[in-house]
Amino acid sequence: MNLTLSNISEFKQKALQWAASFDVACYMDSNNFSDVYGKYDALIAAGSKHQLHATIGTAFDELELFRQEHQGWLFGFLTYDLKNEVEELTSANPDHLHFPDLYFFEPEHLIIIKGDGITIISANASAILYQIEKQKIRQSLPSPGIVLQPRFSKEEYVDSVDQIQQHIVRGDIYVTNFCQEFYADGAEIEPLDIFNKLNALSPNPFACFFKHKELYLICASPERFLAKRGNKLISQPIKGTAKRQTDPQLDEQTKQQLQSNPKEQQENVMIVDLVRNDLTHSAKHGTVQTQELFGIYSFNQVHQMISTVVCELDENISTVQAIKNSFPMGSMTGAPKISAMQLMEQYEKSKRGLYSGSVGYFSPDGDMDFNVVIRSLLYNAENKYLSLHVGSAITYEAVAEQEYEECLVKASAMFEVLGS
């Protein structure tokens, strides 16, 4: 069913509210950001005809088979710790969230929004439209007033950065992404309400609400991990962050300083080199190129430095294999990639899980689009555990106190919607 509506914003709210009543739902919203590689303004998948739960060890092989068997629309996520399947690595840090290592589903109902056009793909599309239109949009709830506790004190964080920089001095790594967790036990939130508040406060092009029974992702990500458009692969790593300023003149000055900051450029180019290397494993020979270097993009809380790396996909490489060849994404690991991942397991205190993993879709035309799970809240409604991870790039030039403050800036929107 295809239709045109004048009030798309209201329809999206109602459709998301309807989808969230299912055991499994995925809502992806570009928030009207203009993106040369974006195909849809929003996708809403609800209910599952078929689903795949896979554990580390054979997860990518199982996903490959699942994709071959189900060549229509698939939605799902990959957790960061699949690194242990891609490389000979381990994860020993505690996990309080208990998300599946990898999960994908073929939706019963799918809503595609592009401009003012809506497509409903379902066995009974007219009934779905009726159910959505009769939804009464719930009023926003009072702030839950949840204060997240840090796993690291500031002193511990600074000490850890100092130790990590000793590894850089020794030549073990050049750059790494060091992450810390803020958490709450016994937290009671209404995930959809929190998502709506976060998406209003911090609209980003790879926003996502994902429900898997009692597990929730509330995501305001600005970053694309990997997309496929025709025979082209696209990766857009983010490295380089500056806090937005309320004064327009000062804000523009901050933006220019980010663009020309040698430390931020160094971080970015190291990760671009890593992404280029990752893509060579999936590319036709000689087709990997940096389409944009040090692009500055502005979001509500921060300016970001984003680069774009593209290649032509080797026809012998499947889309699932292309994901595996680049996973986990370079912006969340470091360089050299394996050494950085090994070291971060030593210095971090929590299992990353879905944080710095990816959520996305495969479409019937063979394309795909996957984000980087950052600027996100993860919630287990069964054990009432709420988690917020945040990280930053550590280089030789990094100043630990400034990196800590950058983490707080990145987390600010999530703190605000929780009432911290």
Image: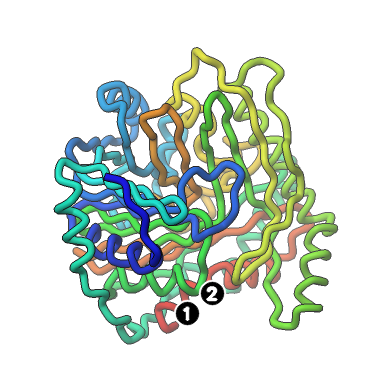
Front residue (pair 106, 78): 106
Amino acid type for the residue under numbered disc 1: Glu
Q: In this view, does 344 lie above or below 144?
A: above
Viewer-closest of 336 and 384? 384
Q: In this view, does 249 lie to the left or right of 37?
A: right
Residue at the (60%, 71%) spot, across then down: 301
Q: Is residue 179 placed above or below 283 in the rendered structure?
A: below
As drawn, the label of residue 283 is none
* x and y percentages locating residue 30 in the rendered image: 49, 55
Q: How many angstroms separate mark 2 from mark 1 (CA)? A: 6 Å
Location of the C terminus (image quadrant): bottom left
- Counting from the top left corner in percent of width and height, residue 195 is at 37, 68
In the rendered structure, are the residues bearing label 2 and label 1 in contact, judged by CB atoms less than 8 Å apart? yes
**Could you say where residue 240 lies in the image, as x and y percent from the top left?**
70, 57
30 left or right of 245 in image = left
| Amino acid residing under circle 2 | Ser
Q: Is mark 1 on a helix, strand or loop?
A: helix
Residue 187 in picture, x, y percent from top left = 28, 75
Q: Which quadrant of the figure has residue 50?
A: top left
Q: Can residue 342 be seen in the rendering of this structure? A: no
Q: What element carries label 2?
A: helix
Question: Label 2, on which residue?
Answer: 412
Count of labels in the image: 2
Can the viewer see residue 243? Answer: yes
| Residue at image point 17% right, 59% down | 130
Q: In this view, does 289 lie to the left or right of 363?
A: right
Q: Specify the quadrant that holds the N terminus.
A: top left
Q: Which residue is drawn at 36% across and 84% down?
A: 143
Q: Mark 1 points at which residue?
A: 416
